[in-house]
Amino acid sequence: MEAIAKLRNYPTSPRRMRLLADVIRGMGVEKALALLEHHPQHSATPLYKLVRSAISNWEQKNEGQSSTDSNLVVKTIFVDNARTLKRMLPAPQGRAYRLRKRSNHVTVIVDEKNPTSVQAEEEVIIAENETAAETAAPVKKKAAKKAATKKSAPKKAKAAKSKKTTKK
């Protein structure tokens, strides 16, 4: 059974947050927490807290089970745009530049990794690799035909020119 945690209106640009979200997507929860705890990027701290919150929500839903015993995985994580504060920045010669202070919403879904489905996925991948190897073996490559090249000027004309220049 999956558990959800949301972070709303966090004042960081969505692109910066997505860079970290892409790193931990599909990762085991313990590994993701270890990575986020020591990551130098500013967005790592709220993501760390959010994943911990999702784990706590999962433990509340599944009473009697601990998150360390089960194979919890960051099943889904996505970052959406939130409100943008528009401010003005003074510029030369009486002008003003628009400054957009972006913020984002983050949603994390944590779920157990089912070991039977993992084995089934591995078997499918192995079967695909075997069939690809079998089909690739009998295929023979045909030799590419050489394109006809354009003939240059006759050699006689070149020889005549060189004789004229040598006579002088």
Image (cartoon, helix red, strand yellow):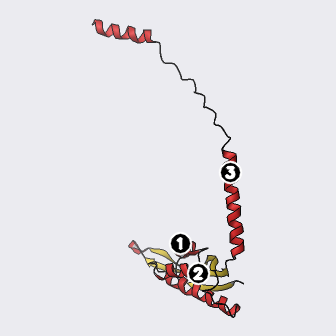
Question: What x and y, as percent, mark residue 90?
Answer: 42, 77
98, above or below 133, in the image: below
Left or right, 60 with respect to 28, comes to right
Q: Determine the image quadrant of residue 28.
A: bottom right
Secondary element at tag 1: helix
Q: What residue is disc 1 on?
A: 19
Residue in view at x 67 percent, y 81 percent: 111
The crowding category of the residue bearing disc 3, from other C-alpha atoms within 10 Å (few below 14, some 14 to 19, many at least 20), is few
Q: Quadrant of the C terminus?
A: top left
Label ID, residue 29: 2
What kind of residue is marked 3?
A: Ala
Mark 1 near mark 3, Cβ–Cβ under 8 Å? no
Q: Determine the image quadrant of residue 102.
A: bottom right
Q: What residue is disc 3 on?
A: 132
Observer-nearest of 19 and 114: 114
138, above or below 73, in the image: above
Mark 3 near mark 2, Cβ–Cβ under 8 Å? no
Disc 1/disc 2 C-alpha distance (Å): 18 Å
